[in-house]
Amino acid sequence: MTLYDLIICGAGPAGSTVARTAAKAGFSVLLVDKENFPRDKVCGGGLRPEIMESPAFSYVADRKAEFLENESLSVRMYGSTPSNFIAYDAPANEPLIYGTSRRNFDDVLFRLAQDAGAKALTKVIVKRIDIGKDQVRVGLDNGKDIKARIVIGAGGMQDPVAKVLREREGLPRSWRTEEIGLAVAHEYEVGEDFIQEHYGNKNTIHLHLKPEGVYGYAWAFPRRTKINVGFGAFLKDIKGTDIKASFKSYLSLLKKSGLFPKDIDRIEFKGARIPLRGPIERTFSERLLLVGDAAGFVSPISGDGISFAMSSGLLAAQVAGECLEKDDCSKKALSEYEVQWRSRWDKDFKVLCEIADMVEKDLDGIISNFSKDEKLIDMMVRVYNGRARPSEVITKMKLRYAKTMLFGGSSKKNKKR
Ligand SMILES: Cc1cc2nc3c(=O)[nH]c(=O)nc-3n(C[C@H](O)[C@H](O)[C@H](O)COP(=O)(O)OP(=O)(O)OC[C@H]3O[C@@H](n4cnc5c(N)ncnc54)[C@H](O)[C@@H]3O)c2cc1C
């Protein structure tokens, strides 16, 4: 039986990034996924600018013709009533968000990993993880076993590697209910003309926070010929809610605002859980690392996790590579991964949780105050899309917010729609 350097459970953005990076560095890598690629994946399909602009991911941007549908340069963010809103137009060279369909995007990442030399096994479910002295044995649902020196958990919220790691590290066996979000979405084909006419040249994205009849955060993202419609909320808040009725209610609101064709009545969506309270307490153990959603790397204010998945994938591949080279895959050696991601993101996740709590408490007050000050809006948008580090701007934001509440703000644009 081949002993791989790395086996990666899950070929989403996190797993394929680990696989590509490690294979490129010369390690033997096996990427395992329960699906065949290309596969659909429920998502808003919003890519943070980092993915398309950072040198670390230039190899992805180089393939944009295969997955990129558009860029959005403008956003409208509404409170619980459509009249309470924030409008923001980004500079032409700084798109707010790039739009894709996960079927194409994930497939490109998956192929990039294989082009770099990673082997792939699809339509196979990882079932068991047994950690031995010199290797990890991975049991598959087809009855076969495979083995590696290090195993990476990149299987999202239900990742089987994470379950083993949690048990070994004395963490709760699964996510706590209050950490879990549920998001649902569907891409409706509406044609290029509708998008042009109703979303404009800037491909304006529309975010509705707790709109009537819908608990949570809802969105309408234009794609080239489609609209990606969805909403997400904490599981604890929508327990017992009729999701289908909420989806219908949101489509009605979009129709009333001219953002959705009146003649489409189909209610279609798929949903998935997402971690919404930041990373879990421990992301490494003997011969194991967790990346992406499996580790909880998702923004608590927006639910976006693709860029964190890819960045954590890069970091995990680097640290795992160093450990493999030194032939030291101990828990202590792999702890370097957590040291590094914590120094980069720990404070940011804490601030994002703080902002999420503030929005939860006084959503309409916050939207109304932000809408009075263009600089405040600019800061908030940059925190949302990752152009600004939350921990670096939060103090400035709070001071400016207090000033706006006391003395009013400077915005002209937000007085009209
Ligand atoms: C409705 C919705 C909208 C979202 N919108 C956005 C957005 O607009 N922008 C954004 O950045 N993020 C968004 N997210 C979050 C984003 O989808 C995740 O953060 C991202 O997919 C995480 O990537 P990942 O590689 O960690 O996991 P995933 O993308 O979930 O990939 C995990 C892979 O592991 C495989 N797998 C799982 N278990 C096993 C197993 N036992 N054996 C083998 N294979 C397995 C799965 O088949 C899958 O391919 C959204 C999420 C939802 C639910």
Image (cartoon, rainbow, N blue to C red):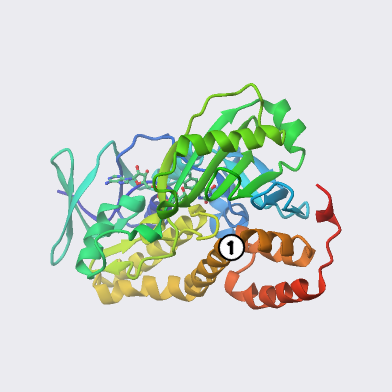
Looking at mark 1, is its residue's CB closer than 8 Å to ligand 1? Answer: no
Residue 156 x %, y %: 36, 51
- Given the current orientation, which residue lies at the most extreme right position? 412
**Up/down of 103 relative to 274, above or below:** above
Residue at 38% across, 72% down: 338
Q: Nearer the viewer, residue 216 or 154?
A: 216
Residue 147 x %, y %: 19, 53
Residue 9 x %, y %: 30, 50
| Residue 398: quadrant of the picture | bottom right
* Tag 1 residue: 359
**Up/down of 205 relative to 374, above or below:** above
Residue at 59% across, 54% down: 48
Label 1 residue SS: helix
**Up/down of 373 relative to 146, above or below:** below
Q: Is residue 321 left or right of residue 414?
A: left
Q: Is residue 38 left or right of residue 365?
A: left
Residue at 31% across, 63% down: 289
**Up/down of 67 relative to 138, above or below:** above
Circle 1: residue type: Val
Residue at 44% across, 48% down: 238
